[in-house]
Amino acid sequence: MMRALPRAGLMSAALLFVLDQLVKWIVTGPLGIDYIGAVREIAPIFDLRFVQNIGVSLGMLRAESEMGRWLLVVMTGAIATGVLIWMWREKNRADQIALGLVLGGAIGNIVDRVRFGYVVDFADLHFGEWRPFLVFNVADAAITIGVLILLVRALLMRDKPGKPVENQ
């Protein structure tokens, strides 16, 4: 029997991907924040700051060569494929949406790495000189939120035995 499409997850992935690419285009296009050192203060605690991220999370696995760049594309593509397979097998709609956030964010960052050789990061949250995060983008935020939702649901909201799972 063929499984139903995880519509909620696929839709959240598609919407997140489009939002990520649109915001990156606005920041680097119309706003002109497209070169190292370009900064625009939005609020006392938030700037738009252009960063070429050649690594992955927390600046790890920096791809400082063409081979490194393409290895990161392959690695993140494999992870995105695993997330898609998980989403396809997932029956719970909330988990599908969380996986969609992770998938859409991963694809957004993969597209950047393929097009530019780096991921466009621009969101700089800071409190004076203290920065609780590295500069990030919409895709990074969605991946983080998706993973947190999955963790919270796995740890705190287990389905009761015999209770039907929420379908789309």
Image (spheres, rainbow, N blue to C red):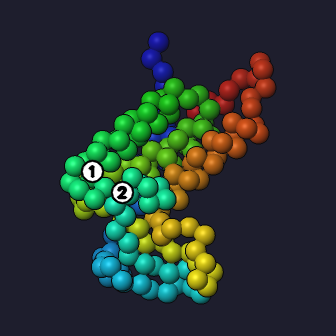
Callout 1 touching callout 2 (CB < 8 Å): yes
Q: Callout 2: helix, strand or loop?
A: loop
Dot 1 surroundings within 10 Å: few (below 14), some, or many (20 or more)? some
* Residue 162 spot, x, y in % from top left: 77, 18
Q: Which residue shows up at 59% across the image and 28% down it?
A: 91
Task: Decide: is 90 above or below 44.
Answer: above
Q: Label 1 vs label 2: CA separation?
A: 8 Å
* Residue 161 spot, x, y in % from top left: 78, 20
Of residues 103 and 113, the one nearer the viewer is: 113
As drawn, the label of residue 62 is 2
In the picture of the structure, the residue carrying the numbered disc 1 is: 68
Going by the image, does 30 lie left or right of 125?
A: left
Of residues 154 and 36, the one nearer the viewer is: 36
Q: Which residue shows up at 52% across the image and 84% down it?
A: 42
Q: Which residue shows up at 66% across the image and 31% down it?
A: 166
Residue lying furthest left in this view? 66
Label 1 or label 2, whichever comes before in sequence order? 2
Of residues 119 and 32, the one nearer the viewer is: 119
Task: Decide: is 109 above or below 150.
Answer: below
Going by the image, does 145 lie left or right of 135?
A: right
* Residue 68 spot, x, y in % from top left: 27, 50
> In the rendered image, is residue 17 in sight?
no
* Residue 62 spot, x, y in % from top left: 36, 57
